[in-house]
Image (spheres, rainbow, N blue to C red):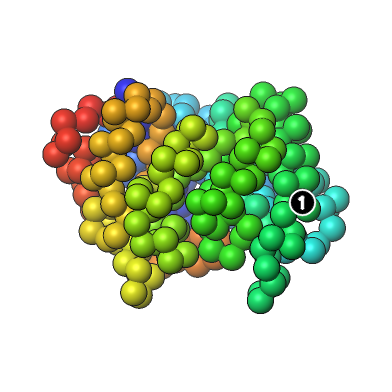
Amino acid sequence: MWTLTGFADEISPDLDEQLNTLTEESISYMEIRSVWNTNVLDLTDEELEKVASAATERGIGISSIGSPIGKVPVTDPLGPHLERFRRALRAADVMGSPYIRVFSFFIPEGHDPGDYREEVIERMGVLAREAQRAGVTLLHENEKDIYGDVPSRCVDILAGVDSPALRAAWDAANFVQCEIRHPYTDGYESLRPYIEYVHVKDALSVSGKVVPAGEGEGQWPDTLSAFDASGFDGFFSLEPHLASAGPYSGFSGPELFRQAAKSFQDLLRNQGIVWA
């Protein structure tokens, strides 16, 4: 059974509005990136527990911690960032989340990503080992300007680290924005063995504009059909970015979030796919 979830801060910074909208859309999980305009890693233990308790009361689980871990220059010292990563592990523990979203470090502008391959794989391995000890799985999101921005380097990281605690979050829109104009054709087959989670948004290659799933060049119908045929059983996380999109967050508001949910659900209905 495929399960819908979503970046709740795309709806509103207010926790109650996040939970109300998810409930109204019959979405029983949320991915927490921020609440009350505060990044999840900057919430106090008391605030984490408050979010967890409120979500539980509404029957909503936490599918993933939408952390910014790995969204720092690869040339920065790892030590301070590792301490911040441990805060992500703490958030996952309090929230009962099986996943933490991570990235593979910004590459200096104008430099060859290959020059930093060994450093990236070493750092991702350090994160994966700590996650495995904590019983959490890391989800590497392909993102512009990081090492793992295109399918070949995503596979390179995942195969190089070779850990069950490091898997892939498939983001078709991000691939399109990185000039991979046919994500399914050019990336799905090589990445499928690692994919455990899917981010739901689409994009136009010429402008880079983010649009609802199925309205861009992310090859959503082909991708969904392939996931279905492969027996995929996991989360599809709405990350619409329909009102604004930045390097560390995005926003849609309640109505555009509902529009994104409807667009994706229509794609699923058209293929006869059942979801929860």
The local secondary structure at tag 1 comes to helix
How dense is the environment of label 1, judged by Cα within 10 Å: few (below 14), some, or many (20 and up)? few
Q: Is residue 102 left or right of residue 262?
A: right
Task: From this view, report whether residue 218 is shown above or below residue 205.
Answer: above
Task: From this view, report whether residue 100 is shown above or below residue 228.
Answer: below
Task: From this view, report whether residue 245 is shown above or below residue 165.
Answer: below
Tell me where residue 6 sits by quadrant. Answer: top left
Q: Which residue is mark 1?
A: 118
Q: Position of residue 128 (x, y in %)?
A: 70, 35
**Looking at the image, which residue is at 40% across and 52% down?**
186
Tell me where residue 60 sits by quadrant. Answer: top left
Q: Is residue 131 left or right of residue 212?
A: right
Using the image as rendered, state which of residue 141 and residue 65 is in the foreground.
Answer: 141
Q: Position of residue 28 (x, y in %)?
A: 37, 31
Using the image as rendered, state which of residue 31 and residue 190 is in the foreground.
Answer: 190
Q: Which quarter of the figure is the N terminus placed in? A: top left
**Looking at the image, which residue is at 63% across and 58% down?**
147
Q: Which quarter of the figure is the C terminus placed in? A: top left
**Looking at the image, which residue is at 74% across and 25% down?**
133
Q: Position of residue 267 (x, y in %)?
A: 20, 43
Q: Position of residue 268 (x, y in %)?
A: 21, 37
Total marks placed: 1
Q: Is residue 150 left or right of residue 260?
A: right
- Residue 251 visible in the displayed image: no
- Residue 107 visible in the displayed image: yes
User: What's under tag 1, amino acid-wise?
Assistant: Glu
